Image: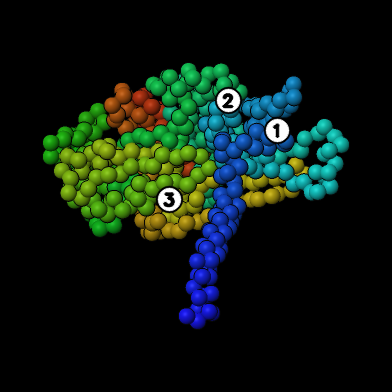
Amino acid sequence: MNPNKRLEDRNKPLKRIRSLIVILFMILGLNIIYYVVFQSDNLVVNDYNPRLQAIENSVIRGDILDSKGHILATSKIENNQQIRMYPYGSLFAHVIGYMGYGKTGVEAYSYLDLIRTKENLWDKFMEGFTNDLPKGHSVVTTLDLDLQQLGRTLLGNNKGAIVAIEPKTGRILAMVSTPDYDPNNISTNYSAYLKDEASATLLNRGTQGLYPPGSTFKILTALAYMQNHEAGDFSYECLGKDTFGEKTIHCYNNTVHGNVTLEEAFALSCNTSFAHIGEKLDMALLHNLAEMFGYNQKIQLELETSMSRYGIENQQSNSERAETVIGQGKTLVTPLNNAMMVSILANNGHLIKPYIVSQVIAEDASVIREQKIIDTGRVLSEAHVTLIESYMKKTSEEGTAKQLNNSQYTVASKTGSADNSTGAAHAWYVGYAPIEEPKIALAIIVENVGTGSTHAVPIAKALLDAYLIEK
């Protein structure tokens, strides 16, 4: 045999080993690149990271501020320990969150920003000669302290939530959830909160609470009907109640509305009229429209969110269709999603992504990062926005939200009273104002108190007056 051939045969295993080693190093290198580029932040904030405590102790966490510079969370050194403090106690608990038993809210979302610093090499060198710790970046939120305080006062001892959005930008102006808790004392009361399942104190009802939408869903039902029907041709004789399949649908207090147009049925929140619409409606179209408005979609926000649910199929019974189109049945929605729904209408059919963290700023007040307005595209035609807006305006002038009728600003509204298995109806209000140039969109829910007209509309009026007149 040729000597060169024998040598080549002997070298084949070595070549395979070398190739294998090269491949393994390439895999290792790619993994390192992946974790450094894409997963480094996740690794740093992972509770199992042994260096996490050392990182936290080497910097004073930055502040969390409202949109006007009020300090919502800050840190101080006491007995060589860093103490996190929340000057407004329970007021922003569900949105700002807490540190201690894990991390929640903006505290969790902005964790890395709050412990990052804008130091150069000279600053780091000089630290060795002082006892001063650097301060992390601060986070500026979109929240309005005055609006938040008023919303919390208006909810009082009720369970519920308020979400207020600036439609043109997506800035969340207020997010109130009750009952609430004091994050300054979370370590003392955490176990008690967990045990009290009935109160669900730790739950952010604004983003995670799932409720039947009640008559607020009639906005989507009316819009779906408009897709394939001439709205002006609609007419129905309301007798206060009617039977659809095996289900008898009642208007509130069995009120007889008589012969109504679609606009009148909407403004008066006539359940039987809308159940009648359900008999004619393309339910697949309603399903698609609901998903375009956020149902069955995960809303991306700085906080944990629950997914609103719309689950009826096109072939369901008449009774199920009737319940669905009036916002009952299996449909569930978060207050955040309902606020986004009316914000879309306020934006002439465009969905602007909501957000809470507007800026990250260094200790010297220089801006490290700023959130941009994100228009995700058109959801609804201008013609349909104009038509449904006119219905919502009539609701504020002559319908179930007529307490909002005033000479200083115009309002587009829809109320709701959502039946549920836990007691009296949940009271809903959704709307925006002023109609000509919307500055605020609202979703309000008050649990187990009765009608939206009686219990949610007065809250909306107080908030709108404060934000649009008294501001």
Residue lying furthest right in this view? 129
Residue type at mark 1 is Asn
| Label at residue 183 | 2
**Which of marks 1 and 2 precedes in the sequence?**
1
* Viewer-nearest of discs 2 and 3: 2
Residue type at mark 2 is Pro
**Which of marks 3 and 1 precedes in the sequence?**
1
Looking at the image, residue 196 lies above or below residue 354: above
Residue 92 is left or right of residue 214, and the answer is right
Looking at the image, residue 464 lies above or below residue 290: above
Tell which of 61 and 128 is nearer to you: 128
Q: Secondary structure at mark 3?
A: helix
Image-quadrant location for residue 203? top left
| Residue 17 position in % (x across, y down) | 52, 63
Tell which of 185 and 211 is nearer to you: 185
Structural distance between the alpha carbons of marks 1 and 3: 47 Å
Looking at the image, residue 122 lies above or below residue 74: below
Q: Secondary structure at mark 1?
A: helix
| Residue tagged 3 | 345
* Viewer-nearest of discs 1 and 3: 1
For residue 131, say whether it is visible: yes
Residue drawn 39% across the image and 48% down it: 297
| Residue tagged 1 | 57
Color style of the picture: rainbow
